[in-house]
Image (tube, rainbow, N blue to C red):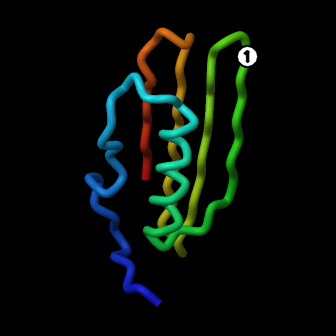
Amino acid sequence: EPTVNPTPKVGLFQYPGSVYDDPDVITDWYKEKIKSGGYNVKSFVTTKTNGSTLNKLAGANGDNKIEVTISQKSVSSPVEISVTY
């Protein structure tokens, strides 16, 4: 079992790509980061409506929680990413 730091570094969950990347690619990247960070994925919700995307991920590791929201208003809009601990 890998040793997990109980207070994750923000940089670990900072997406390295362009804000114009596909929101599904970004979401998959965060899913892997949450798992590799020692968190259990608690919920994963994907909503797509008329070209807009809203994806929400939540993970927990003991008392530590992480929530990621990935949203895009239209296919030509930048992707907004919010990460909270």
* Residue 28 x %, y %: 55, 48
- For residue 42, side relative to residue 11 (left or right): right
In this view, the residue in front, 42 or 52, is: 52
In this view, the residue in front, 40 or 24, is: 24
* Residue 73 x %, y %: 55, 13
SS label for mark 1: strand
Kindly indicate the quadrant of the structure image that contains residue 6.
bottom left
Give the vertical position of 32 relative to 24 (above or below). below
Residue that appears at 53% across and 31% down: 23
- For residue 67, side relative to residue 48 (left or right): left
Question: Amino acid type of disc 1?
Answer: Thr
* Residue 3 x %, y %: 37, 85
Residue that appears at 51% across and 44% down: 68
Give the vertical position of 22 relative to 66 (above or below). above
Give the vertical position of 10 relative to 1 (above or below). above
- What is the crowding at mark 1: few (fewer than 14 residues within 10 Å), some, or many (at least 20)? few
Kindly indicate the quadrant of the structure image that contains residue 52.
top right
- For residue 36, side relative to residue 24 (left or right): left
In this view, the residue in front, 28 or 8, is: 28
In this view, the residue in front, 62 or 21, is: 21
Give the vertical position of 80 relative to 13 (above or below). above
Residue that appears at 29% across and 53% down: 10
Q: Which residue is mark 1?
A: 49
* Residue 24 x %, y %: 57, 36
